[in-house]
Image: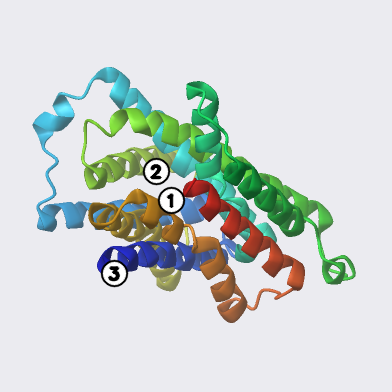
Amino acid sequence: MIKGEFFSFLAALCWAVAALLYKRIANKYPAFTVNIVRTTGGVTFLAVYILFSGSQITSSMLANLPTVVWLYLFLSSLLAFLVGDTLYIMAIHKIGVSRAMPLASLYPIIVMAFSSYVFMEKITLLMISATTLIVLGIYLLSKPTREEKNDAVFDKRGHWVGVVFAVTANFMWTASIIMLKITTNYLPPVGLTFIRLLILTTVMWIIYFVWYKSRYELPHHPLVWLEATIAGILGTAVGTIFFTLSLSIIPASIATPISSSTPFIGTILAIAFLKERSTLPVWLGVSLTTIGIIMFLVC
């Protein structure tokens, strides 16, 4: 059993480290640039992984996919990776990892709330308590601290834009997950992730050559490509694989809360390595949001 919990923790760690790398690169390049480089790295890694791991995804499997499944794969890829992840990277740039990550970790709750509304599932006292903690956490994370307000270089408008970007990313991911659920009966998890990333990478390179190339250049420094590629591999491939492995060993009710510790891990790493401000409101906000998310997921 310990092995399953360890895989789930590794998934959370991968997603947290990826966010730190996004922050480093997003300080120098636009979010779309970061996104196209990291997704290219992620899909390349998954292609190699599938080739050598024996993960079954065959041409006949793809040929037999109904048209509506391809449509959902296409739309879910664009909403999650292109729109949602770009907003997330922009939010990290504007308000930092310690704030953006917990604010952008609410989509499982939105999915559950949507499911409860559609399927008329019962709302429990634990759900209400968890929601209260999350709302308090969001309030603390969204509100600028006194130190920030007194900082001459503090961008108040940029701060709130970052908050809106992080929260909006949740709704993009929620819509993607709802569409993605329909496709899970047709492809294995790793193959499904690969096809979605392949669709996204193709679309993003088309956008780049048709529209983006004349406005922005891709990074020239090899180190930037390396960092973005590692971030893409950790965030879109390795983290997902670890989480899938944990689900194959332990129940989702255990694996999901452990993997939801990503905001807390990310905050610790951001303060330690990116020198983000360690303030009491931010720590309280991260703690309340993380505890609320875990409570909600084990309801």
Q: Tell which of 170 and 151 is nearer to you.
A: 170
Q: Residue furthest front?
A: 125
Q: How far apart are labels 1 and 3 at the CA level?
A: 36 Å
Q: How far apart are labels 2 and 1 at the CA level?
A: 7 Å
Residue 101: x %, y % from top left = 58, 58
Residue 225: x %, y % from top left = 41, 65
Question: Which comes before the other along the chain, label 3 or label 2?
Answer: 3
- Frontmost of labels 1 and 3 is 3
> Residue 176: which quarter of the image?
top left
Residue in view at x 67 percent, y 53 percent: 133
Residue 214: x %, y % from top left = 53, 45
> Residue 245: which quarter of the image?
bottom left
Q: Secondary structure at mark 2?
A: helix
Q: Residue furthest top?
A: 67
- Badge 1 crowding class, 10 Å Cα cut-off, few under 14, some 14 to 19, many 20 or more, is many
Residue 279: x %, y % from top left = 74, 73
Residue 21 to residue 68: above or below = below
- Badge 2 crowding class, 10 Å Cα cut-off, few under 14, some 14 to 19, many 20 or more, is some
Q: Tell which of 76 and 248 is nearer to you.
A: 248
Task: Quarter of the image for the N terminus: give it.
Answer: bottom left
278 on left or right of 25: right
Which residue is the site of mark 1? Answer: 36
Q: Which disc, if any, is residue 205?
A: 2
Q: Is residue 214 visible?
A: no
Residue 107 to residue 90: above or below = above
Q: Is residue 156 visible?
A: yes
Residue in view at x 11 percent, y 44 percent: 56
Which residue is the site of mark 3? Answer: 2
